[in-house]
Image (tube, helix red, strand yellow):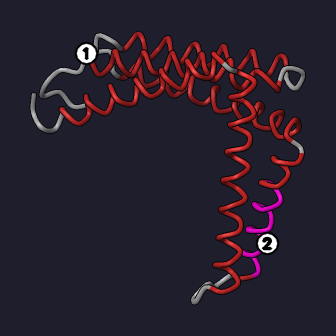
Amino acid sequence: MTSTTAPSRTWLLIGGAIALVVGLFALAAPLVFSYVLTAFVGAFLLVNGIASLFQSLFGKGATHRVLSAIHAVVRIAAGTALFVFTGAGMAALTLILAAVFAVEGVVCIATSIRMRSNPAWIWLGLNGVAALVLAGMIYSKWPLDADWVIGVLYGIQSIFSGVSLILLGLNAKPGAAQ
């Protein structure tokens, strides 16, 4: 195995294992996962908004201070709203998750078609099909099932993604471009 393919193969296997573990956790406790993910996104927005606000107010060389401050306040408001209105936040994140799955599905299918030389290309294609099906399932039941759907469907997609990455890593040929 050459040094150029070893990191690719290793990172595919590591990424696949992480995706698999996250998927299993999400399936084991979908409601908890949905709340944790919503809180994490809210916390990220809140911290990022506060840091951006300080940078826009006190940073040297910030050229568009007013626009930067408005952008920071929007992030702070969004992060706070995810904490205060968790149900509505989960509904919004559920819709965003459906869009992410739809895009991921199209990209995975297109990528799998381009890499038919890899014996595991079919798994990447199936991952794309699964992502598209899950996106359709989310859209069809949104927003009624928003409280648990993030955990269950993200868990399923993460398991498919993890398995496909592991199989791609195991089938990576030494010396072949990844």
| Figure quadrant of residue 102 | top right
Image coordinates of residue 71 in percent, x first then y, are: 75, 67
Out of 175 and 157, give the one closest to the viewer.
157
Mark toward the start of the polypeptide (1 vs 2): 2
Q: Position of residue 100 (x, y in %)?
A: 64, 32
Q: Is residue 67 magenta?
A: yes
Residue type, numbered disc 2: Ile
- Looking at the rendered image, the quarter that the C terminus falls into is top left
How far is mark 1 from mark 2, CA to CA? 49 Å
Structural crowding at the residue carrying mark 1, measured as other residues with C-alpha within 10 Å and reported as few (<14), some (14–19) or many (≥20): some
Q: Amino acid at mark 1?
A: Asn
Q: Secondary structure at mark 2?
A: helix
Residue at the left extreme, as displayed? 2
Measured along the vertical axis of the image, is residue 86 above or below residue 142? below
Label 1 belongs to which residue?
171
Q: Quadrant of residue 32?
A: top right
Magenta residues (range): 66-78
Q: Residue at x 88, y 48 (%)?
A: 84
